[in-house]
Every structure is written in C-alpha cells, then in structure tokens.
Image (cartoon, grey):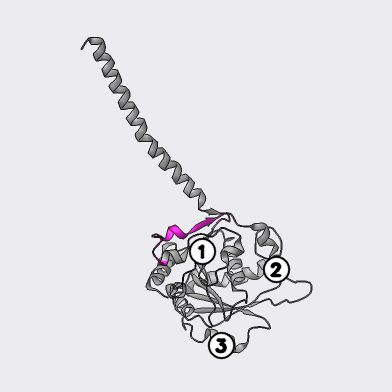
Amino acid sequence: MSIIEKALAKQQQKNNETSVEVEQKTPQEETSNNTVDLSSKDILALDKASLAERGYLIDNGTRKSIKDEFRQIKRKLLNNAFGNASKTLHHSNLIMVSSAKPNEGKTFVAINLALSIALEQDKTVLLIDADVLRPSVVRELGVEEKPGIIEYLLGKSEKVSDIIYNTDIDKLKLIPAGKPHHLSNELLASEKMATLANELANRYPDRIVIFDCPPLIGVTETLVLASLMGQALIVVEESKSSIADIQAATRYLNEDLALGLVLNKAIRSHKDLYGYYGYGYGT
C-alpha cells in the first residue's frame, strides 16, 4: 500500500470514529429533551375563570367574605397542624374533608380550603381526591384526567411522585383519584394506603395534605381513612343535614381526631349572598 493510500485509509478511520461519537451523543440529547418535556407536562392549568364564576377562591380580589371565612377555618387547622396541638395529634398535617351524606358540598369546601392555604407564604398544600367512587376534584378544577391514587395503590405507578401533579397555582399540588376500579374502596382501606398516608405526613413537614373523602354514612372505608388522619372537617348542609345524621357520621371517629364542623350553604343575609360558611370546632 502506498503512502497516499495509507494516509487516505487513516483519514477514513478518523471520520468513522467521529461518526460513532456523534451517533452516541444523539440519544443522550434526546433523553435530555424528553426530560424537559415530561416536566412541563406535570403542570396542570386550572380553569380559573370558571372556578371564580362558581365561587371558588381564585385570587382576583372578589368575594372577600368567603376568603375571610375560609381564612378563619384554615387558621385553626394550621395551628393544630404546626402549633402546640400537633404534639398530641397523629399526622396533624393530614386533614380529611367529608360529610354525612353525598351532595352536602364537601368537595367545594376541600378545594376552597386548599386554595386558601395555597395563599400562605410558608406552606404548601397537596389536595387528594380520595372519593374514588365519585371523584369530582379534577372535574371541578377543569383539568385533564390523570393517573392517581388508584393507580398507585394497584401498583401501576411505582413512586408517589408519579401521581403528584404541580398546578399553575403556586404552592398547590394535586393527586387525582385515577381510573375507577371495582375494588376502589377496599384499596383505600389497604395497608399500602396506610403507608402512603405516613409518607405524605412525614416527607414534607411544612405541607398540609387535604383528602376529599367519601361520605361517612354508607362507606365503611371512610372510617379507616379517618384513622390515618390528624384532623377532620365534616361538612353539614343547613336545612338538610339532620342532627341524627351528624351523630351517626361522627359516632365512630377516632376520639383523638381533631374534629371540626363546617355549616354549608347558610345564607346569612340578602346583602351577603356568599356568606356560606359557619364554623365550629369540637373536642
């Protein structure tokens, strides 16, 4: 082989090595781009205009009376979660929102409470749709259906972080209910659910976790969920919920649970049609 042929062969070998190096970099670049895309998909844009029209606490300077009332409710809950009372409560930052029966407004209260806490400067809030038979949080917020708590409890989502979604409201995160399953309620009463509650309570000590739970009457698994919580809000609809229903709903709750009642749909005056909520805290 002549000197020229050897030089050409050597140059061709260098070109081949350069091509291999470029081909090896391309998958890495694609992986990096995919990571960015996945991150952006995790941010859920809420339908804020629709939420505001339906009385939710979107921070647009309107309906101040509702903001004030939820401010009073959340202040007690935050004090229990992070103040002196937290030393006597198990999982003090886990709060269930339920009602005696369906259609008393528990989801409305759960969402508004989460939106109110998201306004805090030093706290974050995670809203979980745990009403797995009749999930409505995603629909109310106007966001796309996503895998959620059912998929995690079934083992289809391996990590808790897989089902926690960021929203375009700062400090508000969401875990949807997920796709309905014939064993949905049984999954809520599983050991894996207890492990999940423990992880959520301890992973972020400055976070409030709100569970929109099924009604207490007729769904025995709600009592199991309640045993995992530190605090509970029971939504009571004025002129509809009977004293007997309230007693039946709360009779078997853990005595160590910090229990509060929210009076819903109680129009106080003609001048303030949005004065929906009264609030009492029991022992």
162 in the magenta segment: yes
Q: Quadrant of the N terminus?
A: top left
41 in the magenta segment: no
How much space separates mark 3 and mark 2, taking CA atoms?
A: 29 Å
Q: Which residues are magenta?
A: 153-170
Q: Crowding at label 2, few (<14), some or many (≥20) Cα neighbours within 10 Å?
A: some
Q: Residue at x 77, y 76 (%)?
A: 269
Q: Residue at x 46, y 60 (%)?
A: 163
Which residue is the extreme one toward the right? 270
Q: Residue at x 29, y 18 (%)?
A: 11
Q: Residue at x 65, y 71 (%)?
A: 69
Foreground: disc 3 or disc 1: 1
Helix, strand or loop at mark 2 = helix
When the figure is inspected, residue 102 is found, relative to residue 93, above or below; the finding is below
Name which of mark 2 and mark 1 comes first in the sequence.
2
Q: Amino acid at mark 3?
A: Gln
Percent coordinates x, y for residue 16 in the rendering: 31, 25
When the figure is inspected, residue 9 is found, relative to residue 252, above or below; the finding is above
Q: Amino acid at mark 1?
A: Pro
Asked which quadrant contains residue 32, the reply is: top left
Q: Which mark is residue 117?
A: none
Which residue carries the number 3 mark?
247
Q: Which mark is residue 65?
A: 2
Percent coordinates x, y for residue 92 in the rendering: 47, 72
